[in-house]
Amino acid sequence: MELLRYIAKRFLQVIPLLIIVSLISFFIIRLSPIDPLAELRLNPSISQETLDKEMKRLNLDKPIYVQYFSWAKSFIKGNLGYTSAGEKVSTKLKERIPNTLLLTTIVIFMTWAVGIPLGILAAIKKETALDRLLTVVSSIGMAIPSFFFAILMLIFAVKTGWFPVGGLTSYNFNEMGLLGKIADISKHLVLPVIVLFTISLSGLQRQMRANMLEVLDSDYVKFARAKGLSEGKVIFKHALRNAINPMITLLGFEFAGLLSGAALTEYVFQYPGLGRLILEAVMKSDINLVMASLMMGTIMLIAGNLIADILLMITDPRLRGRS
Amino acid sequence: MEVLRKIFQDKFAKAAFIVLAALYIVILFADFIAPYSNTYSNRSMAYAPPSKIYTIDERGKLSRPYTYNYKREYEPALMQTVFKQDRSKKYYIKPFVKAEGYKFLGLIPTHRHLFGVDKGGELYLLGTDINGRDVFSRLLFGGRISMTVGFLSLLIVFPIGLLYGGISGYFGGIIDTLMMRFAEATMAIPSFYLLIILAAILPSGMTSIQRFMLIIVILGLIGWAGFARVVRGMVLSIKNEDFVQAEKTIGASNMRIILKHILPQTTSYVIIAMTLSVPSYILAESGLSFLGLGIQQPDASWGNMLKEAQEFTNILYRPWLLTPGVLIFIAVLSFNLLGDAIRDVLDPKSQKRI
């Protein structure tokens, strides 16, 4: 019950946040001298009727605050307008968002599965050769620019021929059976996942190590040791549970970082995700698409944070009493 | 001084500092060290591979280092043009040769470069790019932009963040709530998305200096909110200390208390945050320029030089075009290592962790 109330409260807090974000993005984009319909007008396959509809939807002849409200109203209704190529923005987003979510979810799961144990290991073996090695490796992982690493991976793919060099599906994807399709997608995912995994792993491993060291230094761990508990019990029953809580908060931030990092990686690998979509939209000054994908990116980010907060609420009993 | 000594006790930090110092010295004297200027271009030598440097002559004797020019030849069997060495004339690499004129440190006009070959010779240490420009020289000039953009953005981020966080934390109440909601909203937009949008709406037809300035401002606009939030948290705890109460009783103005008494207390955090955030600005600039939204041609930055590595034929057959990526990596790694060491020394809480 308490949990539900908390979730409801957090949901309500999201609404003003979204309004402010939409205001910021709307005015940033409108500050630019770009005519939002210019690209549409230039496309001969778009009828005057569609143009008029867009004109009316966005109220472009009215003052800017009216424009904002009409944009917001149609956004809530799910009417996002047309891209400069004449497609519906909403269909385009529906196509791209799952791909980005797929990529980021896999990466988050993998970084947690590898980063947390490595962080614990480094903390337990503090100041040994292993810990130093992990520190050096994580420093290197943090310093490689994602796009540069992606390019190196592409060279690897071309030289060995083991992996496809971009995209998400092969040209004959539609002819494959279900298993074939899954295998095909996984094959395309390997390289982008490796790039994003390497880059986000380092930060996670370091953070976990730092948390673990702090917890291992605390009084209750000392007490547990003094009681004569086995080292395994001390670490896994007492220390780990406390060290992992701050990591859950970080999950939200990690998601944010991944969304940004994924944009460049998607671009290099020609991966059909949200990041590349917004990039292409920006390059073509496709205002409807830019606005919509910016909002969707934000919503995904906020949702990521929300999930992290709720998870934290479940795992950390101390928080429940407070709210 | 004590602090510096402690930082340099860390081997990695010391090495990182030396690397960074060397990089900054090299880019400061880029005009002098680079054999060619930023705009030099030899159209007939596009994508020439790095010049081979020999120290042993054809009779097997030790010689002063020399190189040969390249000539382009069409190879019918391969159906492509290949670069062959023109063995007819040796060009010795000499110190302080006379070449293109420039102003040393922007002041003294001179023609001398640190090293080079005589007139007629070509020396491309790291090959050339699509326009026949010397990659090595452009790396040095590009470093000027890539290595300073981070610091210049910090000049925008830190005053805004400090003042914003200071005011928000000090006044509290409704002002605090409103200011923090706004900061959180800017943080909720995926930063890279915001970055490319801001860069894309920059009007075209700006001079390169204007563009450089605006890129710095944009990078600054991305980072301030997170910083402001932390400052606010610190101010919240500082403002209840006795010395702040004492200032209030003697009638100091709010602004004076914030600027002169509260914010200085955050100095060590600010230094840590600064060194730790430089790399992210370097990475952001290179990412933007890589996409073609940052520093524009003909100016060089490490990011926009890597733009050429987007083409398959380039990365496979012209690996020298990848060198800017290596430099970004080295610079970011060094800043990270140095930042870690500074944090360990200045932040007492993390000290016991190492």
Image (cartoon, coloured by chain):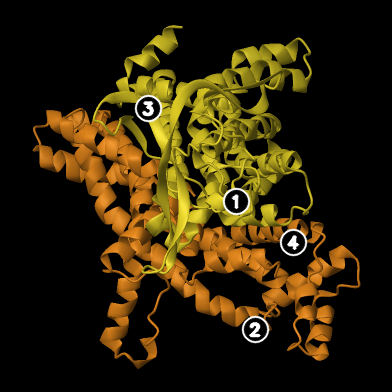
Chain for colour orange? A
Callouts 2 and 4 on one subunit: yes
Q: Rate crowding at label 4 as few (under 14), some (14 to 19) or many (20 or more) other CA atoms within 10 Å.
A: many
The chain holding disc 4 is A
In the foreground, B78 or A3: B78
Instruction: Identify the residue under disc 3.
Output: B65
Q: Does any portion of residue B336 appear in the rendered image?
A: yes
Q: Rate crowding at label 1 as few (under 14), some (14 to 19) or many (20 or more) other CA atoms within 10 Å.
A: few
What amino acid type should be assigned to the residue bearing mark 1?
Arg
The chain holding disc 3 is B
Q: Which quarter of the rendered picture does the C terminus of chain B lie within?
A: top left
Q: Residue at x 37, y 39 (%)?
A: B52
Q: Residue at x 65, y 43 (%)?
A: B299
Q: Position of residue B318 (x, y in %)?
A: 42, 53
The chain holding disc 2 is A
In the foreground, B236 or B287: B287
Find the distance from the CA under tag 1 to the CA under tag 2: 42 Å
Chain for colour yellow? B
